[in-house]
Image (cartoon, grey):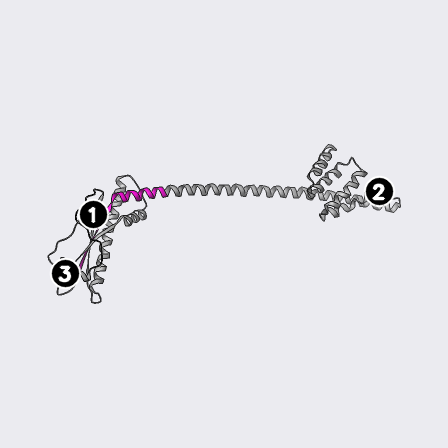
Amino acid sequence: MNQENNSNFAPALSDENNINTPTNESGSFKNISIKIYDGVAECIMNDSDNLKSVKLRAKNLAQENVQKKITDYVFAFLKERYLTLPDDEISSIADEISNIIDVKYNVLDSDDNIMIRATVIAQIDNNDIMNCIIRFFKEREELKSQNESLRNENENLKRQIEDLKRQKDSVAREKSALDNQNNELRRQVEDLKRQNNNIQQNNNLTDKSRNYMALILFDKAFNAKNYNEAVKLYDEAIQLNPNSAKFYYYRGVAHKALGNWAKSKEDFAKAKKLGW
């Protein structure tokens, strides 16, 4: 501890002007892990100052000085142990472990001015430094673990997004295929319409052919999502032509839209058997 002795300074100030600070008791620094540092600062009293404000200003400056010494010690403490921490973390540790145990004041009164000297005495404990270091590395490991968890979650989200994109592409392809089927169905309906017109022109319609020509209503029913009517029309079509694979297939599509999975599966199997 580098405390100056100057005969021009009074040994102490009166109690009424003292700032409350803890006082060191003799015999309290026996622990070898304890280190003592002091910081000294001097301030001149201006015309606008009072004694208490000058003492407070001098104390704050002296406390900054002792804090710098403690920060330097923490840095050296880490360096000896081949440890590296960010500068702001070192300053944070120094602030945390610093314990002010005494503040002393001396006053110099001359003809020109009054000067206040403040000496701040602080102690630190190497064990506190180690505890701070352990906590820092523990928190850093926890942050690493959290970051790894976040990275894994991010990767999972990316995979989910890719899956959704693939599903979207698959839906688009299915829609395109369904559009093609609908276009084919429209062409078939147009053929049926032309056949119906020819039959009507010949005035030679039978009950059976009337039922067959009712299939022209299927396009309208299917596009209107009237799937029950579509199933009914294809029932009649299959009665007219039980070996038509396409009739079974499209009836299976209508059953599927209605949620009749068993009937839909049966129709698809029949269509496949007939060469669809």
Residue sticking out furthest to the left: 7
Residue at 21% of width from left, 61% of height from top? 54
**What distance separates the C-alpha of mark 2 from that of mark 3?**
127 Å
The C terminus appears in which quarter of the rendering?
top right
Q: Position of residue 163 (x, y in %)?
A: 56, 41
Q: Do we see residue 276 in this rendering? A: no
Task: Give the residues drawn in magenta, as a range.
Answer: 115-139
Tell me which corner region of the image, top left, top right, bottom left or bottom right, holds residue 75.
Answer: top left
Helix or strand or loop: what does disc 1 sit on? strand
Callout 1 crowding tier (Cα within 10 Å): few <14, some 14–19, many ≥20: some
Q: Which residue is mark 2?
A: 209
Give the spatial CA distance, label 2 vs label 1.
113 Å
Nearest to the observer: residue 85 or residue 12: 12
Q: Position of residue 220 (x, y in %)?
A: 75, 48
The image's mark for residue 108 is: 3
Q: Answer with mark 3 or mark 1, whichever residue precedes in sequence.
A: 1
* Disc on the earlier residue, 2 or 1: 1
In the rendered structure, find residue 36 and report the number of the disc placed on it. Answer: 1
Query: Label 3's element?
Result: strand
Where 150 falls versus 54 (above or below)?
above
Question: Of callouts 2 and 3, which one flags the residue occurring earlier in the amino acid sequence?
Answer: 3
Kindly report which numbered mark, 2 or 1, lies closer to the viewer in this rendering.
1
Q: Position of residue 67 (x, y in %)?
A: 25, 51
Q: Is residue 148 left or right of residue 30?
A: right
Seen at 26% across and 45% down, the residue is: 74
